[in-house]
Amino acid sequence: MVVAMTDIVLIGGGHCHALVLRLWGMNPLPGVRVTVINPGPTAPYSGMLPGFVAGHYVRDELDIDLVRLARFAGAQLINGAATGIDQDGQMVHVSGHASIRYDLCSVDIGITSEMPQMPGFSKHGVPAKPLGVFASRWDQYRATATDPKVAIIGGGVAGAELAMAIAHALSDRAPQVTLIDRSTALSALGDRARAKMRAALDAQGVDILENSEVSALTQNGVMLVGGQELSSDFVVGAAGAKPHDWIAETGLALQDGYITVDPTLASNDPRIFAVGDCAHLAFDPRPKAGVYAVRQAPVLFDNLRAVISGGVTRPYKPQKDYLKLVSLGRKSALAERFGVAWGGPLLWGLKNHIDRKFMRQFD
């Protein structure tokens, strides 16, 4: 007698899915086959990227080993990029691989960058996301740069973190690091946090170029609207985050290209869930941040099991605010919550403790 298996397919090895695999390995459900689809055998942890760029961590410390994690969970890992979902046929299409059938599916693929659409960017720039690609390009540049001139396009918190990390890592080579924003840098922060961040950028020698629109990249650097050219040999795109294009072809309900989910994290197709940055929480919209993906994991885990076993699903309730910890290049950090901001080396120690504790879960 052949017993039919129930197939769960996890698209992407993001933070939420990594934690779901860990939970599954500790408490699997009989008769269920789990498959993970990811472009590579590892998934970078975004929280440690600035520390890696600054030189505080090595590359291996940044990556979650999906091969080992899948083995622990009793799951199959397919190295390939998902390119589509066929709702009617319940199939996930994968580049270079046969399509994968699912009974339940979850999408955790993060976001990508629209920077490559800028003239010259694909040849002369590197987007900050996907993180793995950026980390590899940064490793190469850091090893060979002798007269570094770096430009970061996008003056949000992520761009500022990278600018300070880069300035710190190259501090022995008198780097020129410029943070470019089309409007006002760090506008998402409260007044106190913004003032502290700008002071930290200044202390690291980072120039801030505001109200400046980038028109193109060339082999010499960054061209601005109006004709000004900024000399640079490493250009990072930390602006223009967008959803992956293939999501638009799934037929799922979307908001600005992101998969709309209800409190159970299910899409308008109850067999398809979405978590992390690729999901839009229609019931309580939140900014894109890794803390939400991490806290979605136990809810997704419970709800996948509930749907399979006929149990009751539970809602995900995102917190209204959370402690933001921002690296300041050297081993110092800024914290902000409820409009209150403070900084110093002790906060970097706290951030390092939190990040390493998260990664130890996958050892």
Image: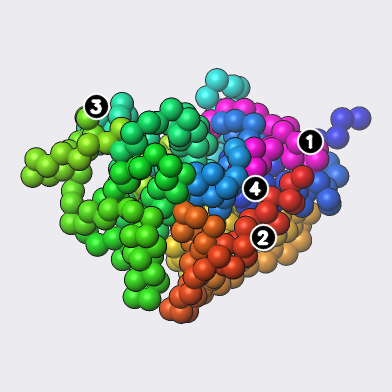
Residue 87 falls in which quadrant of the image? Answer: top right
Please tell me whether residue 64 belongs to the stretch shown in magenta.
yes
Rendered residue at 57%/47% (across/down): 56
| N-terminal label among 2 and 4 | 4
For residue 107, side relative to residue 313 (left or right): left
Element under label 4? helix
Q: Is mark 3 on a helix, strand or loop?
A: loop
Give the label on residue 71, or none: 1
Mark 2 / mark 1, whichever is N-terminal: 1
Q: Mark 4 highlights which residue?
A: 17
Q: Which colour scheme is used?
A: rainbow
Residue marked by disc 3: 219
- Residue sitting at 50 percent across and 55 percent down? 330
For residue 12, side relative to residue 119 (left or right): right
Q: Which amino acid does label 3 sit on?
A: Gln
Q: How far apart are marks 3 and 2 (CA)?
A: 41 Å
Q: Give the range drawn in magenta.
A: 60-85
Which residue lies at the image location 86% right of the left edge and 44% below the top edge? 30
Going from N to C along the chain, the mark reached first, 4 or 1, is 4
**Residue 86 appears at what percent x and percent y?**
53, 35
Q: Determine whether label 4 and label 1 are within 8 Å by CB.
A: no
Residue on which the image places disc 2: 353
Q: Position of residue 230 (x, y in %)?
A: 20, 40
